[in-house]
Amino acid sequence: MKIIVAAKMVTDPNIKVRALSDGSGPDLASVKMAMNPFDEIAVEEAVRLKEAGIATEVVVVSIGPAKATETLRTALAMGADRGLLIRADQPVEPLAVAKLLKAVVAKESPDLVLTGKQAIDDDSNQTGQMLAALLGWGQATFASKVTVADGALQVTREVDGGLQTISVRLPAVVTADLRLKEPRYASLPNIMKAKKKPITEKTPEDYAVNVAPRLTVIRVEEPPARQAGIKVATVQELFQRLHSEAGVL
Amino acid sequence: MSVLILADHQDERLDEATAKAVSAAGQVGGDVHVLIAGQNCRPAAEAAARIDGVAKVLIADDPRLANRLAEPVAALMVELAGGYDTLAAPASTSAKNIMPRVAALLDVMQISEVVGIGADGSFQRPIYAGNILQTVTSADPKRVMTIRTSAFPAAGAGNAAPIETVTLTDSPDLSGFIGSELSASERPELGGAKIIVSGGRALASAENFQTVIAPVADALGAAIGASRAAVDAGYVSNDLQVGQTGKIVAPELYIACGISGAIQHLAGMKDSRIIVAINKDPEAPIFQVADYGLVADLFEALPEFRAEIDAKATA
């Protein structure tokens, strides 16, 4: 079984990103970047499937600026076999990402595409579903457990009220939720080895995909900041204030 | 101008999120229709017909639509899409699964988690864990969007809209339902609760959630929430996680107990009307967003708090 993992380079999840004062976009100058945490989980799942002898090859794809090569190297150090960077210096919307990935799938013919359920920068939660739609494949989103058997997957999904288990015929698209796998830290020897693994670079034009955005960003702004309130000294004071001042109890 | 809302429902009942999506759709303008897709879902359709502002309810009652698997429901939405300018749904896990599939099949870029609708046709949505609000317009011929329901009030329930049957003609057979494990709880749903009592890593065990958090929640008729740390540690089930990638909530009162206040957690609760933080660490970031902060050991404070509630109830 061949697996493609789509991994996005995003801002480090521990950083509180601010808006530029002119409202044109997020202030990303000198902000630390990292692989989207959910995509890291997807990479881990793919590598585990390879280690279990189920997957034969893991190809990791990233769409982004030259720096996104670092995200590919991280995935290669975790155990992916080769990388593909589709170079795009402007943000690419999920619909266009899905179209690019569809074109990659046409060339690579994987049995499974894995990606994170959501990128923590634009918080769209769309790419996997859109890719499955464009390919006419089944989808299993928000996966917390994946098992492979007889040309199909059994996937446990995190849903609002708890968990749901479905079967999906292969080929399919699966998006990873938080608890699918704990991503490993790459060992130093594996980081060194990853430097020798191949990374191909392409452009959206190579796939004849128009990545012009459909949404126009009018402005961005920070939501009104919540002011810290008061410290209360005792539980009794807290209760009194919630009752008589805030009127919520 | 007309809007089709994919309802959030459990066949025999309608989730409150649907009435919130209807009030959001009212701001988009035009007739609002609600689609109930499922199996034996007449009760949900009847509940949807009572929502104020709904011009028509469409019901698709079909075994292929049972459990609302993404592929058949998306196929149905696409079949119906021709009559609408806007396709919307509350941003539940069900709709988040289905709507992007609909959008891609229509070659439309979805607008996710809409929190504001401008009179000029613009939409506001949070990005970067809610630290930034983005205002966008769409160049697509149709709009496909999910609505963050915590940002909109629920529409009233005094209506009697007509219910019309629609059918799914072509359904791709790509996935199948095996089973579900839904958390059984007498407590309110996190998404609709007026009060939420939430616990973090400091709870230290699943038992402590039951013995320290639950009595306070039950005395207040509140839902129980948790931080990612508490869920990861196995103290409560995954569906109670409040945060950027868990539930986004905005209750009247949110009581954060032993939660430090990571960016990802704040993203899920910072729009609550009143936030209370109880934490031993006076430097915990949660205090920066709390209206009322109590620096205390939650194992002492919460039983005392419960006693205050009981004292008031009997007063």
Image (tube, coloured by chain):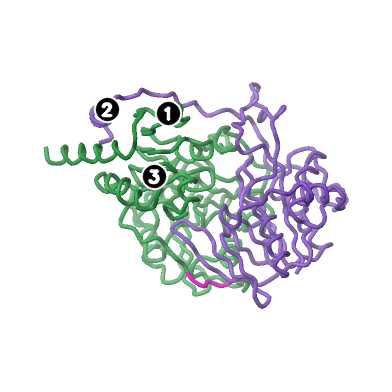
- Which one is nearer the viewer's eye here, B191 or B201? B201
The picture places residue A181, in percent across and down from the top left corner, at 61, 56
* Distance from Cα at disc 1 to Cα at disc 2: 15 Å
> Could you say where residue A199 lies in the image, as x and y percent from the top left?
86, 50
Q: Are marks 1 and 3 in contact (CB under 8 Å)?
A: no
Q: Residues within 10 Å of mark 3 (few under 14, many from 20)?
A: many
Say left or right for A93 vs B20. Answer: right
Q: Is residue B229 above or below residue B315?
A: below
| Principal secondary structure, stretch drawn in magenta | strand
The amino acid type of the residue labelled 2 equals Thr
Q: Nearer the viewer, mark 1 or mark 3?
A: 3
Question: Based on the displayed image, in which of its 4 quarters is residue B45 positioned?
Answer: bottom left
Q: Is residue A137 above or below residue B188?
A: below
Is residue B176 shown in magenta? yes
In the picture, which chain is green? B
Q: What label sits on residue B114 in the rendered view?
A: none
Say what secondary structure mark 3 lies in: helix
> Which residue bears the numbered disc 3?
B203
Q: Earlier in the sequence, mark 1 or mark 3?
A: 3
Q: Which x, y percent locates residue A243?
A: 24, 31
Q: Colour of chain A?
A: purple
The answer to whether mark 1 and mark 2 are in CB contact below 8 A is: no
Residue ID for mark 1 = B287
Label 2 neighbourhood size at 10 Å, few (<14), some (14-19), many (20+)? some
Question: What span is colored magenta in the figure?
Answer: B175-179
